[in-house]
Image: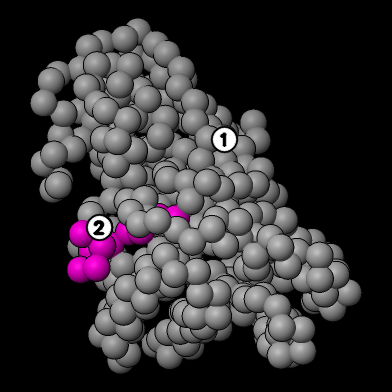
Amino acid sequence: MNEENFIPTHSHKEVANGEVKARCSSNIALVKYWGKYDFQLPANPSISYTLTNSFTETSITFKKSNDFSVELYLDNQFQEKFSSKIYTYFLSLKRFLPFIDSYSYSIYTKNSFPHSSGIASSASGFGALAKCLMEMSEMLGEITTEEFKLMKASFLARMGSGSACRSIYSGLAIWGKNSDIPSSSDLYAVSFPFEIAPIFKEMQDTILLVDEGQKQVSSTVGHSLMNGHPYADLRFKEASKNLSDMSQVLQSGDLEQFGKIVEHEALSLHAMMMTSSPAYILFKPNTLAILDKIWKFRRESNTHLYFTLDAGANVHLLYPEKEKGLIFSFIKNDLLKYTENGNLILDKVIF
Ligand code: DP6
């Protein structure tokens, strides 16, 4: 598939007005996307779990209009900055959704997680928007199959925020070309194409909210600091190898190896930030305290509790459901004190 395949071949019909709705989950990357080229294309392939309880719900009402406009409401509050961001995003999709600037839009969106939690809403947010737009396109006559609809929604979501393209699929999703995954592409994400070992279908993700504030350096800036980064080439190659290895591990059910790759990826991501120019650090002393406790607990308890980090201070704890009892006591007794307000989100992969 190339970009041209996403340009509709029939002209759209005109509809006076309508409404479309979609829900899209957030995701947590096991192998991280960090660095991009051209227009929102990934410098290395990535893979993520789509989550169950962290999601965005969006509805769009549209009206035929000579005045293309976008009004976005988050929790029923008008958002001026987001509205103009989405206006620009919609315009960028014109080649693939030729009707886009012939309507005026009111977008109502809400997240299942608090806005201030430090959980990025861009993946689930753009995922939900892209799904809505594909509903609209179909309503206006674009001929699609279920498979193509997902693929194009992923393609459209990617143009808003890279990691959003993986959120379109439940389970595990891969974005970025990798020679061991024949269906993979830089343009859109695909569902993990192989049989997954049962243990990896019931992974829990408990998110410790260490810092609920706005982070100082956005992901967009972070990605751009990978241009000319002294370790960039090595990082991109290693991430690609980690993805191939992870693909094997997910099929074989090797939990220890899973943990090794996941933690290495999380620390590599933050190592890239620390060695960027200018350098920056997004984790907090409490993030490190949590990692230290996890390593100690693992040595002593013979459990499979692993961490991963996003571009922020919060810690995602990944573990199999059958070890939930022991691990959750540990979280409550030893880790909760490192969170900002005793806050955590109990989540798990969705299949
Ligand atoms: C650290 O998808 O938020 O979460 O494409 O600029 O919107 P943009 O960046 P974004 O970057 C996410 C980076 C990450 C790793 C990942 O999810 O793979």
The residue where tag 1 is placed is 57
Q: Nearer the viewer, residue 152 or 248?
A: 248
Question: Which corner quadrant of the image does residue 244 belong to?
Answer: bottom left
Q: Element under label 1?
A: strand
- Residue 32 placement, left or right of 156: right
The residue where tag 2 is placed is 184
Q: Main secondary structure of the magenta part?
A: loop
Q: Is residue 132 above or below residue 311?
A: above
Figure colour scheme: one colour
Measured as percent of width and height from the top left, residue 278 is found at 43, 86
Taking the image as drawn, is residue 303 in sight?
yes
Local crowd at mark 1 within 10 Å, few (<14), some, or many (≥20)?
A: some
Please provide the residue range marked out in magenta: 172-182
Identify which amino acid the numbered label 2 is placed on: Ser
Q: Element under label 2?
A: loop
Name the residue: 14% across, 47% down: 1
